Amino acid sequence: MLQSRRNFLRLAGLGIAGGLIAPQFLSCDNAKPGSDSPLHNIGLQLFTVRDLLAQNPEETLKNIAKIGYKHVETFGADPSNGNHWGISTDQLKKFLNDNDLKTHSGHYDLQKYLDKDITDKENLEKYIEVAHNLGQEFIVVPVPPMHKLNQLDVASYQYMAEQLNKAGEMSKKAGIKMGYHNHFWEFKEFGNGTKGLDILLAFTEPDLVSFELDLFWINKAGESPQTYFDKYPGRFSQWHVKDMDRANSVPLDQNKLDPKTGKRDTINLDEITRTTKYTEVGTGSINYINMATFANESGLKYAYVEQDEIYSADKYASIKKSFDYMQKNFK
C-alpha cells in the first residue's frame, strides 16, 4: 500500500501481524454468504506482489487476472504525480482494462495529513483525482503517522478523526468515500478500555468515513471482530483477508503495564517482527468460514486477499492458493 509503508515494512522486516479467532466466532453457525458474495468475488491487495510490480506491472496484472481475480486494491501512488510503480495513472488504467480488472479501492499515504504537528500536508486533491480516474470508490488511509507511533494519544486519534471527516467531505464531491485501515496499534488502550480505533469510529461521520478491517491484525491484537461489528454495524465496508501461521498465532500483549512507570508498554516493532508470520488463506489459524457469518452486519462490500510477506519463491502460486480457497468455500 503506498511507498512509505513499503519502506517501513521492509525496514521493520514485518509486513505488519495476526492472531487466533476469538471464541465467540467458533460458536457461530457455519453459514456462507449468498451468490456472488464479496468473499467469493475476492480481490487482491497489490501490496502482496509489490516486488513483481516493481519489475513489470503489466505482466504482473496479466498474471493476476489469469488466476481469476476480478478486482485489485492499489497502493503506492506518488503524491507528486499520481504515478504507481513508475507508470502513469493512464497506463495503470489501460493495464487494468486490458485484463478486465477493476479497482474499487486504493491505499494512499496521508501520514502528514493526519499529523497535527505537520503543516506541509499531502496533496489530497491529487489523490482524489487519481482515485476518480481509476474508478475507485474508496480512498483508504493504511497507517497513522508512523514516525510518532509510540506518541499517539487520545488527542492524536481525535485529530485524525477530524481530518478524516474533512477529507471525506472533499472526496464525497467526487463520489468517493474515505476509509481507514487498521493494524494492531489502534487497539492499544488509553485507560478505561478506550482504544484508538474506538476513537476513530466514534468521532468520524458514517456517511463520510468507512473502515477497512484487517482481520489478521485485529485478531493479532487479541480483539474480537464480532465485538466491533456489533458495536459499529455497517461501518466496515471492506475487509483484508489474510491468514496467520499456526505456529505464530499468540496474540500481542501491547496493553500490559510497566511496573516501574505505571504506563503501558511501548510498541516494539522488532520484537513483533520476530513473532509474526503470514500464510495463505485457509492454511492458518483464522477460521474464515465462521468469520463470514458477520459479513452483512459488518456492511461488507469488498474483500481482498493480502499477504504481507510471501515466503515461497512462486508468489503467483501463493496468491492462487488463497484465491482457490475463497472460491471453494464461498459462493
Image (cartoon, rainbow, N blue to C red):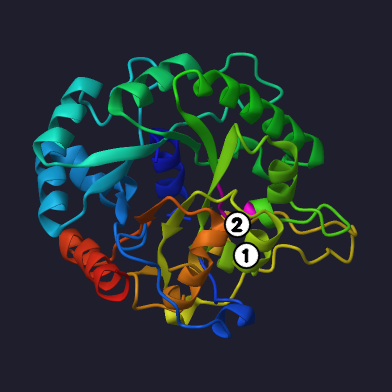
Name the quadrant of the N terminus: top left
Say which element carries label 1: loop
Could you tell me which residue is drawn at 65 percent across and 28 percent down? 165
Could you tell me which residue is drawn at 81 percent across and 54 percent down? 194
Which of the 4 quarters of the picture holds residue 315?
A: bottom left
Nearer to the camera, 161 or 33: 33
Q: Residues within 10 Å of mark 1 (few under 14, many from 20)?
A: many
Q: Which residue is mark 2?
A: 184
Could you tell me which residue is drawn at 38 percent across and 56 percent down? 308
- CB atoms of marks 1 and 2 within 8 Å: yes
Which of the 4 quarters of the picture holds residue 330?
A: bottom left
Q: Which residue is mark 1?
A: 221
Magenta-colored stretch includes residue 136: no
Magenta-colored stretch includes residue 182: yes
Give amino acid for label 2.
Phe
Per the rendered image, the range of residues in magenta is 181-185
Q: Is residue 291 left or right of residue 84?
A: right
